[in-house]
Amino acid sequence: MKTNTTLPLAAIMAATCLLSACSRGPKTEIRNDFKPFYDHFGVEGSFALYDQEQNQYILYNEAQYTQPFTPASTFKICNSLIAFETGVAPDVDFTIPWDSVQRNPVWDKDYDLKNAFKNSAVWYYQEIARRIGPERMQLWLDSLNYGNRDMSGGIDKFWLTGGLRITPEQQIDFLRRLRKGKLPASDRACALVQMIMINTDTAGYVLSGKTGWGSQEDQDVGWFVGYVVKDKHVYYFANCVQAPSARLEDVQQAVLFDQARRGIVDSVLTRLNLKP
């Protein structure tokens, strides 16, 4: 007796549609209505969000999505991971005594890693980088495929005033790999980094991220990158703002620039109904 191996037409069509959907990749939605959020703070910039559930990108100022910028203190996410992996920092409570150099009242004290991350204490992470050392740092940047992996400018300055650059696209990709366990790093190290990144944790809603503020050529560059978990759905985001450095010599303009990094994210998340 012969067995009929012919698939029903409906099954063939369903499989074809499924394969076609997979091959199309993520969807993209352009949102020009985010521009007033940037105008409010007097900055230029771009916003990118990846909706993991819908496999969709939402972009404002798409041209900047692949444009490289200095990571500034957003590199503390990567620097922390490398510190845990190399054993330079055994845990989030690892404390380094203040070096007595007066910088500002917030930074001028002993710091452990979790609070240095929270308050963006640059001196602490510069010391962490020096203890990691150039060779190990370069090996990890290459292994993690972080930005352009350029360490020019010195072991304690390459992410601040040196050659390291990262795009909004790469910021989101790195965060996705971190959270999904796709980095060549231990589960423990990835979990510790995700723990110190938490900004807000309420019932059914978690906001995790890191700000940054640096300079590049004749402009200042500000970041807020991270992800939102709302009702178990994950949304990764990268907000990058820029303003002429000369203009930020005005205190009021500098305050607006500082506020723009997180303020724009709050406005966008509200517009997208991604706030509790």
Image: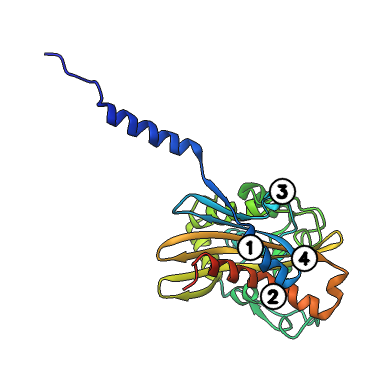
User: Can residue 1 be seen at all in this image of the molecule?
Assistant: yes
Residue under numbered circle 3:
148
The mark closer to the camera, 1 or 4, is 1
Question: Which badge, 3 or 1, is on the more N-terminal residue?
Answer: 1
According to the image, what is the colour scheme of the structure?
rainbow
Residue under numbered circle 1:
34
Name the side, left or right, on which 28 lies relative to 71. left
The mark closer to the camera, 4 or 2, is 2
Residue under numbered circle 2:
259
The mark closer to the camera, 3 or 4, is 4
Residue 119 in percent (x, y) is at 66, 77
Question: Which badge, 3 or 2, is on the more N-terminal residue?
Answer: 3
Tell me, yes or no, whether the two marked residues, 3 and 4, touch with CB atoms within 8 Å.
no
Q: Observer-nearest residue: 54 or 124?
A: 54
Instruction: Find numbered disc 4 in the image and state the secondary structure of the residue it sits on.
Output: strand
Q: Marks 3 and 2, Cα distance to the nearest angstrom?
A: 28 Å
- Residue type of the residue flagged with mark 2: Gln
Q: Observer-nearest residue: 158 or 46?
A: 46
Tell me, yes or no, whether the two marked residues, 3 and 2, touch with CB atoms within 8 Å.
no
Residue under numbered circle 4:
214
Q: Tell me if residue 55 comes above or below residue 112 in the rendering.
A: above
Tell me, yes or no, whether the two marked residues, 1 and 4, touch with CB atoms within 8 Å.
no
- Residue type of the residue flagged with mark 1: Phe
Name the side, left or right, on which 46 lies relative to 274. right
Question: Which badge, 3 or 4, is on the more N-terminal residue?
Answer: 3
Q: Marks 1 and 2, Cα distance to the nearest angstrom?
A: 16 Å
